[in-house]
Amino acid sequence: MEILSEKKWDNQNNIPKDIKEVTAVNSPTGSVVVGATITTTWSYTPQANAIPGTLRVIDNATKNTFLISSTINLTSQSFSWIAALPTGTYYLAINDGSSNKYSGTFIVYQAGGAAPTPAASSGPQAPSGATPPAQPQSSSTN
């Protein structure tokens, strides 16, 4: 007789907690102008009874979070949205029902200004990790 191990369940979403549908989130390349359309992509392992994903943008310095959509079709592996954000450095978080998956950082800047050069970064630290170093900001007083 085979004994099955007990699975831990996410009762809110009625799925096993060990399911990981999204395995990688790709950030926009380089810098993005405020108001630009961004297409976010991710790697996805199809699951039975998949639930919609949630896409958020997180300010790398303040950790303020902006909800982009709570009804992402994860099987599409892409979603387009408008960068209606204040200027700054950001990263993406997609939640597939098991946990957040994070992208690397990208910079949003105001149109008409010079596009900043992003500092080399392997991506943000998860919220429970150390805070990444602040990106240098140029300022002018005219």
Image (tube, rainbow, N blue to C red):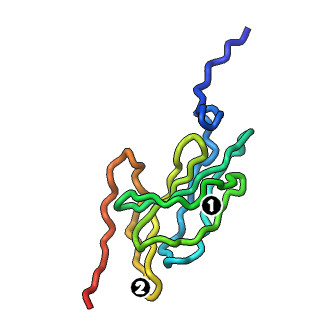
Q: Residue furthest top?
A: 1
SS at badge 1: strand
| Kind of residue indicated by mark 2 | Ala
Q: Earlier in the sequence, mark 1 or mark 2?
A: 1
Q: Which residue is mark 2?
A: 114
The Cα atoms of the two marked residues, 1 and 2, are separated by 26 Å
Where is residue 55 drawn, in percent x and y?
57, 56
Where is residue 118 drawn, in percent x and y?
41, 71
Residue under the image location 41 percent in, 86 percent down: 113
Where is residue 136 drawn, in percent x and y?
30, 71
| Kind of residue indicated by mark 1 | Thr
Quarter holding the N terminus is: top right
Where is residue 14 drawn, in percent x and y?
65, 33
Does residue 54 appear left or right of residue 107 in this picture? right
Circle 1 Cα neighbour tier, 10 Å, few/some/many (<14 / 14–19 / ≥20): some
Residue under the image location 50 percent in, 53 percent down: 102
Query: Foreground: 86 or 109?
Result: 86
Question: Which mark identifies residue 41?
Answer: 1
Quarter holding residue 137: bottom left
Query: Foreground: 112 or 120?
Result: 112
SS at badge 2: loop
Quarter holding residue 61: bottom left
| Mark count | 2
